[in-house]
Image (cartoon, rainbow, N blue to C red):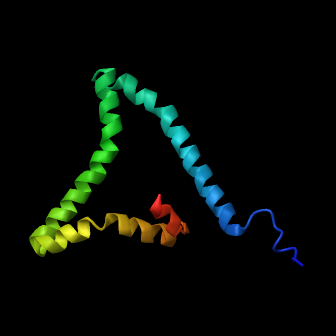
Amino acid sequence: MSTSSENSATPMSEVGTVTIAFAALLLGAVAMGASPVFVRYAEVGPFTSAFYRATLLADLFFAGDLIFWHLAIVNTTMANATFLATMAPVWVLLGSGLFIGENPACSSARR
């Protein structure tokens, strides 16, 4: 026999996830709506503008990764720095459970 709390439509954690997803969707829509203004007034051509917009964010994250990796190489051994840098998939796996509550199944690694 189930209680009324077990039959609730959406648990609180799911409501929070939906709220965060909706906020991200709204922020993305505002960014997409405002970006043509910057494209129009940019002093470069449309292809150059599109190229820089697409690569800017990825480049910033990659540059930050390289900066910290190079700092690690200088301040510790090359083996240590490289080992920690190549452990990124492990950190993502652990962080997914900690930060977003995702519990990846072992069977997903065998695909």
Does residue 74 appear to the left or right of 27 in the view shown? left
Residue 33 picture location, percent across and down: 52, 32
Name the spot of residue 100 as percent of width and height, x first: 53, 65
Q: Quadrant of residue 89?
A: bottom left
Eyeballing the image, is 31 above or below 10?
above
Q: Which quarter of the figure has residue 25?
A: top right
Looking at the image, the residue that sits furthest to the front is: 110
**Residue 104 seen in the current view:** no
Which percent across, then down, holds residue 28? 52, 42
Q: Position of residue 15 (x, y in %)?
A: 69, 61
Residue, x 30% and y 53% (percent of image)?
61
- Horizontal side of residue 21 vs 65, given as left or right: right
Viewer-proximal residue among 65 and 41: 65
Residue 70 visible within the image: yes
**Residue visible at 43% across and 71% down in the picture:** 94
On-image quarter of the N terminus: bottom right
- Number of disc labels: 0
Q: Indicate whether 86 appears above or below 26.
A: below
**Residue plotted at (30% across, 34% down):** 52
Q: Nearer the viewer, residue 78 or 35?
A: 78
| As drawn, 44 above or below 104 | above
Q: Quadrant of residue 69?
A: bottom left
Residue at image position (31%, 23%) is 47
